[in-house]
Image (spheres, grey):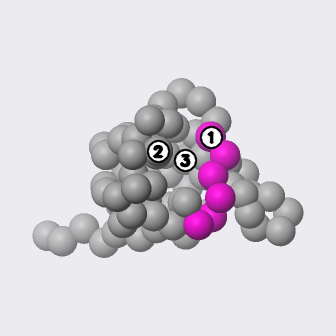
């Protein structure tokens, strides 16, 4: 069965997903250093009033990302909200 992937920036507040891969190799290194590793569960916590930046819970802390950065992270959805 093929898993449908989407960008982290497409999640809704409170929705969790599992990091699968990255679309930008240069950005991937920066994101890996911040704890965004494949297999890690992330949860969209907040979205700024004008939609950018967003805040995600990852590796036990809150991380703020620009939507452009978040769009380079491919995630697979979880069935439930955490």
Q: In the displayed structure, does residue 31 sit left or right of residue 49?
A: left
| Range drawn in magenta | 63-68
Q: Nearer the viewer, mark 1 or mark 2?
A: 2
Q: Element type at marker 1?
A: strand
Query: In the rendering, which numbered label is found on residue 43?
Result: 3
Q: In the displayed structure, does residue 62 sit left or right of residue 81?
A: right
Residue 23, placed above or below residue 42 = below
Q: Which residue is mark 1?
A: 63
* Residue 80 visible in image: no
Q: Quadrant of the N terminus?
A: bottom left
Badge 1 or badge 3: first in the primary sequence: 3
Q: In the displayed structure, does residue 5 sit left or right of residue 17?
A: left
**Residue drawn at the location 72% of the way across and 51% of the way down:** 46
**Residue drawn at the location 39% of the way across and 63% of the way down:** 24
The question of residue 13 being in magenta is answered with no
**Residue drawn at the location 68% of the way across and 55% of the way down:** 54
Residue 1, placed above or below residue 75 = below
Q: Element type at marker 3?
A: strand
x then y, percent, for residue 23 = 36, 66
* Neighbours of disc 1 within 10 Å: few (<14), some (14-19), many (20+): some
Q: Are marks 1 and 3 in contact (CB under 8 Å)?
A: no
* Residue 26 visible in image: yes
Extreme residue in the front direction? 26
x then y, percent, for residue 14 = 62, 52
Distance from disc 1 to disc 3, alpha carbons, whole Å, reads 10 Å
Q: Are marks 3 and 2 in contact (CB under 8 Å)?
A: no
Q: Nearer the viewer, mark 3 or mark 2?
A: 2
Badge 1 or badge 2: first in the primary sequence: 2
Badge 3 or badge 2: first in the primary sequence: 2
Q: Which residue is mark 2?
A: 30
x then y, percent, for residue 4 = 31, 72
């Amino acid at each position: 069965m093929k898993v449908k992937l989407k960008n982290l920036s497409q999640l809704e507040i409170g929705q969790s997903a599992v990091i699968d891969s990255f679309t930008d190799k240069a950005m991937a290194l920066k994101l890996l250093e911040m704890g965004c590793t494949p297999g890690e569960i992330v949860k969209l916590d907040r979205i700024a009033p004008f939609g950018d930046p967003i805040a995600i819970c990852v590796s036990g802390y809150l991380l703020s990302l620009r939507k452009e950065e978040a769009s380079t992270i491919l995630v697979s959805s979880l069935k439930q909200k955490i």
